[in-house]
Image (spheres, rainbow, N blue to C red):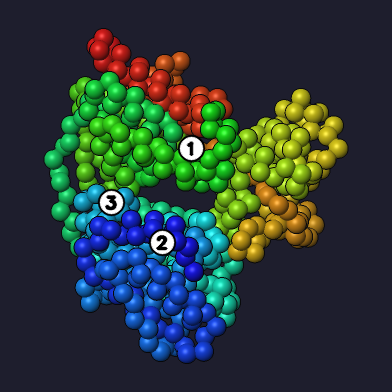
Amino acid sequence: MLDTSLKEQIRSIFAPLQAKYVLNVTAPPQHENKEEMIELLGDIASVSEHITYHVQSGNELAFSVLKDGKETGVHFRGIPNGHEFSSFLLAILNADGQGKNIPDEAICKRVQALKTPIRLKTYVSLTCTNCPDVVQALNLMAVLNPGISHEMVDGGLYPEEVDALKIKAVPVVYADDELLHFGKSDFGELLGKLEARYSTTAVVTDCTVKPYDVIVVGGGPAGSAAAIYSARKGLKVAMLAERIGGQVKETVGIENLISVPQTTGDALAADLKNHLGHYAVDIWEHRNVENVAQTGAEYVVSTNGGERYQAPSLIIATGAKWRQLNVPGETEYVGRGVAYCPHCDGPFYKSKHVAVVGGGNSGIEAAIDLAGICSKVTVFEFADTLKADKVLLDKVRSLANVEIFLSSQTTEVIGNWEKMTGIRVKDRITGEERVIDLDAVFVQIGLSANSSVVKHIVTTNERGEIAIDAHCRTNAPGVYAAGDVTTVPYKQIIIAMGEGAKAALTSFEDGMRKV
């Protein structure tokens, strides 16, 4: 099944393994996919003397990963091909205490503090690009806490089960047979949901205030640039972030990052993390900042884990979130037809039929932009009038391939697991509903700046954006801001990176001059 070159790559990956692993397989004797699974696991076992497999008769096509004869809590119901192949390999590495995805000690303690037993199950499609992040995060939690078990279920092999649960898109996570999560997610968000669902034992938190020269809050393009530029000045830098990459990870394709013709959100996030690793930046990932307090000339930043960090300089780069429709199917199909940035994602739908939800300036501007790329653009506005400026309305009404519907409420995003295929729209006057077949929908109902945690310190505008000057200074001494969370125009990756660098340089010069 696996070609020679791939086997050699896997052999290299598994060369450092220390423990002995058994892939314990159960399979119905006549299952049509039995031989495929045995062949795959046999190929994996052949590349490492630390891995063997054992097959026995059972009711389902599945296998579990055992370490030194004991269950790791990691189970696969189905054959982990496609995008889940990496989840399978990573599960073995994680069980051996290896892998770049293993979080720091404080986060591990939070996982280990969850009150168990917890039985997790994730339904996936092997072609889903969002599923592996969820599967890998929950597999890792199972490895870290012996009271947690996690099973990946290939929905394509169990259609009756999927239909019974009314699953329309993946990934979908159940905790002890109750819905926990659906759609794209990451380790930190999933851990937060488990902590909210299951009480935790007391976590011993390091209450010592960690001192730094500068604290960067946010791990996206702006935050990463700020941290790197600060570290290059010889400063002691801490980065506090929910996830490295930030909102970038929700972008499938990126073609407007100058000098990089094409990349993906996940790849760019990995590149940011790799670049940060070349500098003395203390990365505290999977943290939510809960409070920022000023103590004299210093700022103390507290996280949801009870940790505290202190510095005379803060760079706020927490980004912004696109306002969502909050309708069924929207979250599940983000990156698979549901988009929020026409500049970033519009070119991927060249010569296709797309919709824009929103009739304000951003929505009409998006429709005008997309009209030059797409075969047809349909605009849906909730109100009975368009709110965009007259010059934009004149332009959009002159375009032959743009149609506009007023008093239209988008009630559902419809898809086929692989991607979205259309939206359901309700006429607010007649109450009539109809399904519009589409290749993509661009939600343009505004941005929400992630500034709430510092609003008591800095000045914000009516949209919650942090007011900055040309040098990224805020009104608060020692506090700088960069990227989408600020009033800087045009929310673009390349602009955020430049703003992050600018904020770091300003912070350094102000500190040097004792401004």
* Amino acid type, residue under disc 2 in the picture: Lys
Residue 40 vs residue 399: left or right? left
Instruction: Tell me, yes or no, whether the two marked residues, 3 and 2, touch with CB atoms within 8 Å.
Output: no
Above or below for 206 versus 59: above
Residue drawn at point x = 47 percent, y = 65 percent: 2
Instruction: Tell me, yes or no, whether the two marked residues, 1 and 3, touch with CB atoms within 8 Å.
Output: no
Q: Residue furthest left?
A: 208
Tell me the residue that label 2 is attached to.
Answer: 7
Q: Is residue 384 visible?
A: no
Front: mark 2 or 1: 2
* Amino acid type, residue under disc 1 in the picture: Ala
Tell me the residue that label 3 is attached to.
Answer: 103
Image mark for residue 320 = 1
**Residue 277, percent across and down?**
30, 37
**What whole-number distance in Å separates the C-alpha atoms at marks 1 and 3?**
25 Å
User: Label 3: how many residues lie within 10 Å, few (<14), some (14-19) or many (20+)?
Assistant: some
Residue drawn at point x = 40 percent, y = 23 percent: 501
